Amino acid sequence: MPTTLEPVQVDEPDLADAAESDRPWIVIVWNDPINLMSYVTHVFQKLFGYSLEKATELMLDVHEKGRAVVASGTREEAEMHVFRLHEHSLWATMEHET
Amino acid sequence: MTRRFKPPVYATTKRGVTHWHLNIGEDERIVVGQLLAELRGLLTAESDHPSPLLLRLFPTAYPDDEDKEAEYQRLMREELVASRVHQLDAVAAVLDRADDDTPTLDEGEVVALMQSVNAVRVVLGTMLDVGEDDEIGVGEVGDEHETERQLYGFLSWLLDWIVRSLQGTT
């Protein structure tokens, strides 16, 4: 049994990492030349419960600007959204919100 | 006298319950069935090198992070294949209802049809290298992929009607 207390090494939490992991994730759908505009609009309504107007606006952003942020949340939530978009054959990616 | 056009897929609601009807000819049903079976074959082929035609069916989730991307593909790819195969099988069962000229579908089946038809379109579109300004189904006469181009046009038309039938009810 040690008679003296040895200095204990404590790992200080890396604040930069913590801040990084707290930042929300965004889900981006990218334009592609194959998916129909009507189909993309419908998928946005179905997966995210958006109104026809909101879904159409996002679809037009994808079509005209090349991409649109369609959802955000924790990493797990964003990954589930991306998976479901992939199930519908849409080109979706996720990244940290800047 | 003109006949009233009936869409290839349409919904009817009776006593609050909606059903969908697949109103395409037997030849078209056979073609759709064959295309879906071919996709199933590509998806389930045992190979370390999946067909490049499937590239768009398995997009990158994390373009900026190699490690997270590898983890995503490891965890999700198999699940994505299983989900697609499950839907293809649901549609195959509908198409096999040979005793019915206009098979009736429930919502799950029409959604499976929508996603499966689109998945085949995506594969055909990849094969044809479809571009943003290309007119659907139109190509040079006599080009080597004329058949695929026509199938792509047919499936695009069918998909648009499937979406319309769902938009009216959801």
Image (cartoon, rainbow, N blue to C red):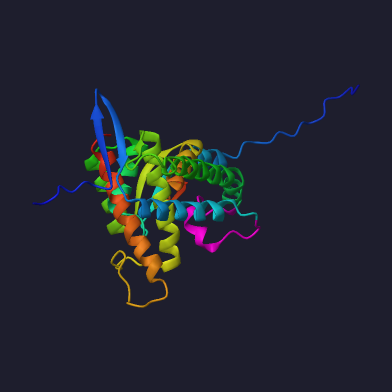
The magenta segment: B47-66
Q: Is B13 on the left-hand or right-hand side of A26?
A: left
Q: Looking at this view, is B5 or A8 the one in front?
A: B5
Answer with left or right where residue B45 lies relative to residue A92: right
| Residue drawn at x 44%, y 63% as measured from the top left | B126
Answer whether residue B58 is magenta in the image: yes
Q: Where does the image place residue B164, in percent across and percent down from the top left?
A: 25, 44
- Give yes or no for residue A38 being in the magenta stretch: no
Tell which of B153 and B28 is nearer to you: B28
> Residue pushed farthest right?
A1
- Res B168 visible: yes
Q: How many numbered marks, from 0 up?
A: 0
Q: In the figure, A30 relative to B147: above or below?
A: above
Residue A27 sits in quarter: top left
Q: Quadrant of residue A44?
A: top left
Q: Is residue B59 visible?
A: no
Magenta segment, principal secondary structure?
loop
Q: Position of residue A35 (x, y in %)?
A: 35, 55
> Which quadrant is home to the C terminus of chain B?
top left
The vertical placement of B150 against A59, above or below, is: below
Q: Residue at x 11, y 51 (%)?
A: B2
Q: Position of residue A52 (x, y in %)?
A: 23, 40
Percent position of residue A97, x then y = 42, 45
Front-lying residue, B71 or B25: B25
- Residue at figure coordinates x 24%, y 34% from the top left: B12
- Which residue is most to the left? B1
